[in-house]
Image (cartoon, rainbow, N blue to C red):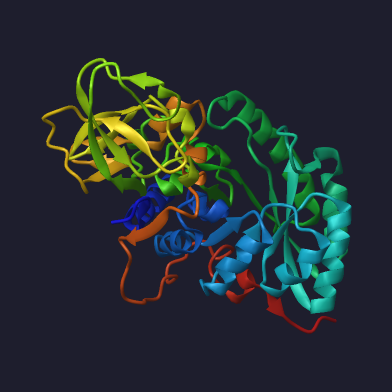
Amino acid sequence: MYRAQATIDLAAVRHNVAVVRRRLRPGAACIAVVKADGYGHGAVQVARAALEAGATGLAVTTTEEARALSDAGLGVGVLIMGPVLDDQLEEAVAIGADFVAWSPEFVRSAGRVAESARRRVRIHLKVDTGMHRLGVDVAMAPSLAEAILAQPWLELWALMTHLATADDDPEFMEHQLEVFDRTAEVVRRRAPGVLLHAANSAATFRGERAHYDAVRTGLALYGMSPFHRDPAEDALHPALTLSSYVATLRDIEAGEGVSYSLTWRAPRATRVALVPIGYGDGFFRALSNRGDVLIGGKRYPRVGNVCMDQFLVEVGRGSPVAFGQPVVLMGAQGQEAITAEHLAALVGTINYEVTCSLTARVKREYVGVIPEPRELYEEAGNDEWSVTPRLSGRTEDHG
């Protein structure tokens, strides 16, 4: 037993990928988004499980994240969705990554590095359809597409965008998709084979309208709701259980306070249990005096301030709670469950941040692992996204 442990059920990840794939329009592929160390779940392990379940590509944000997946030998191409600086391009090209481009300067730099390495590099041209974060202005997209096509070692592989309000404003999402459709129509006159992808998890679950040739599934992969509600409403299984144990038990009298600043005082003679996990592990201090934990399948309230390494819960005198008992902070125990969505609501944040905040001090343990090696990619589906040498980059003579 560890003082702070995240148990990740890879069978749940495979289930969630299957849920996503059943929703896809025929021919659309699933790209598994495993950035930020798989949203705190472990990128390599989650990526492997997602591929086992039929995902046909992976997406991250940084060159370092792409390198970790490449070193794991997963045999599938990786899309780097974030900015790549010139001094990282050589490494990213060497591992066969796909790039997202939205500026002429990056296209020129990528072209030079690709030519030097003699590797064809696939480019996903990102269009800003209304989020105003990353992406080329729609008016400039055709000229940037031409600039990519003019580079002999670059391949205009896909056109993409990102949807700002798929979780809460489908009307604006539809506006973005209409802008994307018009832009794609113009670009495809020059590059008819270019693929299209736009949907995040929320857009994927809203229907086939945004599926195009592929979807980029992040949050749903981990069994968290893209609509910030109970994941069971979307048939998703949360993959992560965060747990600790009862380290001490202490009887206190009515009126006595606990933890820093004594923000909670006992209304009666009671007993408190110390749980050795805190904000140094990524469990928010904002959860002080808020919410419950699960011990023996029952709920017990958190009391006092959450410290860097520990917090307290009230279990009451005469309670069956004993030293060493497992404590679930997030996940299921018996008939009770605490979701990332519930914790996020208590803190005033989103479920993404709850799992991404878990630090390296939290021991990751994996269950639901497929023990025997096997061919994972026999039925990749859409040939354009299936696992072939094209997806992992290639060295070739050009001319």
Compared to 39, does 225 lie above or below?
above
Position of residue 296 measured from the top left corner of the image (x, y, whole percent): 17, 40
Say if residue 227 shows up in the picture. Answer: no
Residue appearing at x 29%, y 31% in the figure: 313
- Determine whether, in the image, residue 40 is placed left or right of residue 8: right
Q: Nearer the viewer, residue 327 or 99?
A: 327
Position of residue 77 measured from the top left corner of the image (x, y, whole percent): 60, 67
Residue appearing at x 65%, y 50% in the figure: 196
Q: Nearer the viewer, residue 211 or 153?
A: 153
Compared to 347, does 104 lie above or below?
below
Res 275 quadrant in image: top left
Quadrant containing the N terminus is bottom left
How many labels, in total?
0
Q: Nearer the viewer, residue 262 or 102?
A: 262
Residue appearing at x 69%, y 77% in the figure: 394
- Determine whether, in the image, residue 349 is placed left or right of residue 271: right
Say if residue 138 shows up in the picture. Answer: yes
Position of residue 398 measured from the top left corner of the image (x, y, whole percent): 82, 81
Q: Nearer the viewer, residue 189 or 172?
A: 172
